Image (cartoon, rainbow, N blue to C red):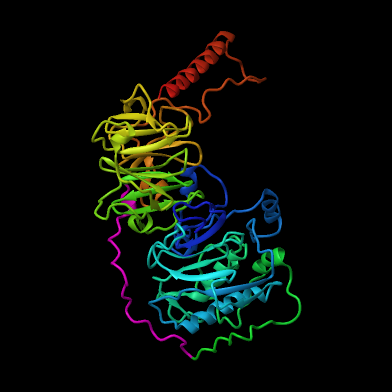
Amino acid sequence: MLTSTPDPATKPQKEGGRETQACSRTSVGRSVVLGLSECLSFADEKTLEMMRKPRCSLPDIIGTSELMRRRRRKKRFALSDSSWQKKKLTWHIRSFPDSTQLTQNQVRNIIYHAFQAWSFSSALTFKEESSEEADILVDFSNAYHDDSYPFDGPGGTLAHAFFPGEHPISGDTHFDKEERWLFDPENKSPGHGTDLFAVAVHEFGHALGLAHSSNKESIMIPFYQGPVGFPQEYRLPPDDVMGIEQIYGKRQGGSRPDQNMPPLPVPTARPIPDLPPYRPTQEPRLPAPDRCAAHFDAIANIRGEVFFFKKKHFWRMQAARTLVSLEPAQTLRFWNGLPQDFTAIDAAYERINDSQIVFFIGSHYWVFTDTQVNPGYPRPTSDLGLPRGTVIEAAFVWPHNHKTYFIEKDQYWRYDDHLGQVESGYPKPVTLWRGVPPGLDDITRWNDGNTYFFKDSQYWRFTGGNVESDAGYPRSTAHDWMYCQGAPTSHPTHGSSPKPKDEDGPMCICGSSAHREAPLSSRVLLCIWGFLWAFMLQRDALSM
């Protein structure tokens, strides 16, 4: 497609001081903030169709509060916090796609015209450089390519670009060379590949400092919409013109063609011959599991996104509560260092002290920096201070106390990541978490500060520091998290909270009323009961 920030997670991040914008076949973006189940219940067919389109997974709302205020009133384009401090930029193609119908000269011409689209509508000029000293380096790479944001093969992430800045990789743009890149300005080969020009214009917008736009006519909309016409004739939509002019100013004078780069020849009836049957250059993709069957092996919040692992695949839910794609990605293509013969991830979590990512498989664990395994792994779980042979089935950081919890069968341990040791007094029985059945698949936190317990096709919510599941649960994982419209919304079976509670906990409300008041003694007793109930919940939370 067209993703924000490193691919293991995706809210804008920095690696070595630079920001990145990556793009993949992903989901509909954020417009309002709702509760999880309420938000996901809006997954109608139109939403699902948008999720099937290639998309840049950069978060859709970026910028300062002042920028957002002005966007709501007038503008839809969005700016990043970085820009080039000069207006004459150079570019160089360092590597070309291997398996494509495009010649290297065609690729150069397409890239040239993609830059010219931004030059035509701003004070910027671009010139091709013959060496790697250029400001913007363009690469066609696959899988792991030294920037911590691996590509995932055909049909997944299409490209990513880094925002401007002082880091050596700033502005660089990478395309997944396993994609079937086309020059198809009239869209005569729909479904047979991806138009390189359209994606290049979008990515170079990121390389120049533009984020995503909510304007459906913009080239910077998160979704890949197909070819945009002939490169020589293409002009940016007004929304993108306003965005690039705000950063670099308006274009002065007439056209400024690069005399060293001949224009792309006007194609005849069919500029690119029909594609031959696609033959993958690497191993075939594994059969993908069904997301609507739910029952995931592991679920983890990593970099603010929730990853759902099943067998050798995973789905990602972004902070905007949308899936990056309805189709799963291969775990081994994303995290380099897990055993090739593993059958399932048992548990995973992001450490709170150093943001390292920990995977558990059997009685061993692996620690990753972003997508690369650290030296010296795997190690036995006994190195964590757990009994020899312990198989962690769930791992999560509880937002209430920022402690890590490891669960095996019907018992759990509390672990201090800062000290690197299991705390005294553990293990304890899982039944201390009230309202959920035994044999949980996994537990994870969400960005709303709540904790979610999963088992089979159901999940339970624990609000804040509560140790009892909320009323109205369990609910359907497939319906609320996986956008499966045919799934039931709730399962009024075992595990529901026995005592309905107000979402904000017990309250004492005082004020005037025309209604008859309860006797003073009753009101006093009610308030005392409320405070006692809150005290008991807090005591239970502290003892966990």
Q: Is residue 272 magenta?
A: yes
For this orientation, the residue located farthest to the bottom is 268
The stretch in magenta equals 269-294
The answer, for residue 284, to whether it is visible in the render is yes
Q: Position of residue 26 (x, y in %)?
A: 46, 60
Q: Is residue 456 left or right of residue 105?
A: left
> Residue at the spot x=45%, y=78% of the render?
182
Q: Residue at x 57, y 79 (%)?
A: 112
Give the total number of marks visible in the rendering. 0
Would you say 264 lies left or right of 239 here?
left
Q: Is residue 385 magenta?
A: no
Q: Residue 250, image x and y in percent? A: 74, 71
Where is residue 456 drawn, in percent x and y? Answer: 30, 42
Q: Position of residue 385 (x, y in %)?
A: 32, 31
SS majority, magenta: loop
Q: Which residue is most to the top? A: 521
Q: Quadrant of the C terminus?
A: top left
Residue 484 appearing in the image: no
Q: Residue at x 39, y 76 (%)?
A: 98
Residue 516 or 267: which is nearer the viewer? 267
- Give the vertical position of 246 relative to 534 (above or below): below
Q: Tell whether 439 sits left or right of 530.
A: left
Check the image and report above or below for 157 versus 395: below
> Toward the viewer: 446 or 463?
446
In the rendered image, the residue lying farthest to the right is 253
- Give 147 or 512, whichever is nearer the viewer: 147
Up-down: is 449 above or below 18? above
Could you say which quadrant of the image residue 246 lies in?
A: bottom right
